Each structure stands twice: as C-alpha cells, then as structure tokens.
Image (spheres, rainbow, N blue to C red):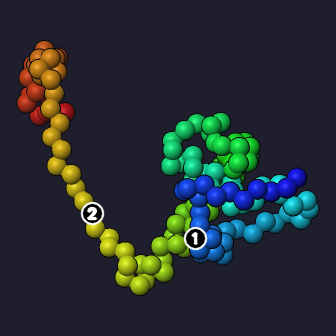
Amino acid sequence: MARVAVTRRFDLTDAQWTALTPLLPVGEKPGRPPKWSKRQLIDGIRWRVRVGSPWRDVPDCYGPWQTVYGLFRRWQPAGVWQRLVTGLQAPTDAAGLITWEVSVGSTIARAYQHGVHDCVELYGGCREAAEEG
C-alpha cells in the first residue's frame, strides 16, 4: 500500500519532526515494518488533543483510530510524553528563552440568591457553618 504524505495545516513541520525524532523511543521488536509511520500517528494524537473530539473521530489519514489511541495509551504509562515535553523544553530553557511566570486570575464567584438562602436554612447561617467546619 502506497503511503500518502500528510500535510494538514496543524501537522508537524519537517523542522519540528527533525527536533522530535531523536527523543522518540526506539522500537524493540524486530519484524514487519509498521503500516503507519510514527509521524502520522503522533499527528493524529495531536489532532485529537487539539480538537477534543472522541478517538473514533480521528481522520483516517492518520491511521485507524485504534492504532492512534493505542500508541497514545502505550506511551502514557511509560512516561514518553513527559520525556518528550522535557526534552523539547530543556534546550530552550537553557538558552533563557522560556519565561516561567505564574499568572493568577481574580475571577469572582457569586452564589445566586437561592444558594444563599439554602446555606442559611441548612446550616443556620453561612458564617456559623464555616466556623463549625
């Protein structure tokens, strides 16, 4: 079966793939070569994570959804994804190109009026309930 180059808008570029390739685990089992390239499967995983769709909706050009999902699940407990992120961040961080800042939002959460009444009825007052707990 001929392989079709996947060149979708958000797929890995050649430069990105070149940076990622040395960090990928090497297959341990000899035998038949895989039908789907790691690049296609990783692009399928990236598509699914970016879009947030069910695994069954991964486009066919990335391979069968079961194969894409299988790679994702095998690499997750093995720590491969964490090693990839760390390996890609390390040179950039060493060059001082990553700014590690923490941003805290100041969103206000308010209860609607019935929520306040429920609190008073259940606990005899919100202040008293907070002091007891």
**Frontmost residue, 114 versus 49:** 49
Label 1 residue SS:
helix
The amino acid at mark 2 is Val
Residue, x 22% and y 56% (percent of image)?
104
Residue, x 11% and y 34% (percent of image)?
131
**Frontmost residue, 130 versus 59:** 59
Q: Is residue 3 left or right of residue 74?
A: right
The amino acid at mark 1 is Gln
In the current view of this chain or complex, which residue is farthest to the top?
121
Measured Cα–Cα span from mark 2 to mark 1: 27 Å
* Crowding near the residue tagged with mark 2, few <14, some 14–19, many ≥20 C-alpha atoms within 10 Å: few
> In the rendered view of the protein, which quadrant contains the C terminus?
top left
In the image, residue 94 lies at what x, y percent?
43, 83
Label 2 residue SS:
loop
Q: Determine which quarter of the picture holds residue 95.
A: bottom left
* Crowding near the residue tagged with mark 1, few <14, some 14–19, many ≥20 C-alpha atoms within 10 Å: few
In the image, residue 46 lies at what x, y percent?
57, 53
In the image, residue 52 lies at what x, y percent?
51, 42
**Frontmost residue, 36 versus 120:** 36
**Frontmost residue, 62 versus 85:** 62
Nearest to viewer (mark 2 / mark 1) = 1
In the image, residue 28 lies at what x, y percent?
81, 66
Which disc number belongs to residue 3?
Answer: none
Residue, x 42% and y 78% (percent of image)?
93
Q: Is residue 129 left or right of residue 101?
A: left
Check disc 1 and report the residue beneath it: 16
In the current view of this chain or complex, which residue is farthest to the right?
31
Which disc number belongs to residue 102?
Answer: 2
Taking the image as drawn, is residue 65 in sight? Answer: yes
